[in-house]
Image (cartoon, rainbow, N blue to C red):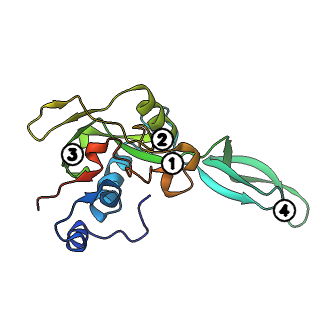
Amino acid sequence: MIPANPKPFSELLQEVDGEYVPYLALLATLEWRDKRSEIIKRDDYRCTSCSHSATENHWDSKNQRLIHFWWGDDELTFVKNEEGKQVLTALPKITSASKPYHLQVHHRFYIRNKLPWDYSSEILTTLCNWCHQELHLNEVVKVYDEGNNLLTDLTPCSRCNGAGWFPEYDHVNAGLCYRCGGAKFEELIKVKVDR
């Protein structure tokens, strides 16, 4: 999850002073926030797989539970006014969701040591958290070295087994694996930055 006030990459570089930068720290930068926003806007704020948008959340204090829903277009409906008369009013349609949806940006492939925002927009796509998880469970995302050679001997993260996140913990830091920070592979946990 991107913090409310992300810091620029240049500031992050000063903080680490030539050390390796964790992938999770790169996803908390101003540059990634801007690239992520660009891709989600391009994809019309919807998952390119299932077409869901992000849900809104509301705490139902009466039933002590979190409700997930989508706002829809306004619909005309009759509502009682202050005098008790039925009047035709435009109200937004609300559709409930059985689980929370939030939008993520997926890299179709990775290049070792490349910054997440330095990929061309065609390589990035918007997925909801559920489609993103399904994709990573069923497909292996290819990783290339800096010379465009396919890396085939990468070791999945020992904590998340290469998924990069845990959907059951998506309420904490968007469910990103704390060990690999979403990098998925042991060899990609630390990204070398030569800038």
Spatial CA span between label 4 and label 1: 36 Å
Residue 26 found in image quarter = bottom left
* Circle 1 residue: 102
Residue occupying image coordinates x 32% and y 41%: 185
Check residue 119 in the rendering and tell me which mark sits there, or answer none: 3
- Dot 4 or dot 1, earlier in sequence: 4
Residue occupying image coordinates x 67% and y 46%: 93
Check residue 128 in the rendering and tell me which mark sits there, or answer none: 2
Category of crowding for the residue at label 1, using alpha-carbon neighbours closer than 10 angstroms: few (below 14), some (14–19), many (at least 20): some
Residue 124 found in image quarter = top left
Category of crowding for the residue at label 3, using alpha-carbon neighbours closer than 10 angstroms: few (below 14), some (14–19), many (at least 20): some
Q: In this view, does 109 lie above or below 14?
A: above
Taking depth in this image into account, of 55 and 99 the one nearest to the observer is 99
* In the displayed structure image, the side of residue 122 where residue 39 appears, left or right: right
Q: In this view, does 152 lie above or below 1?
A: above
Query: Residue 177 placed where, x, y %?
Result: 44, 49
Residues at badges 1 and 2 in contact (C-beta under 8 Å)?
Answer: yes
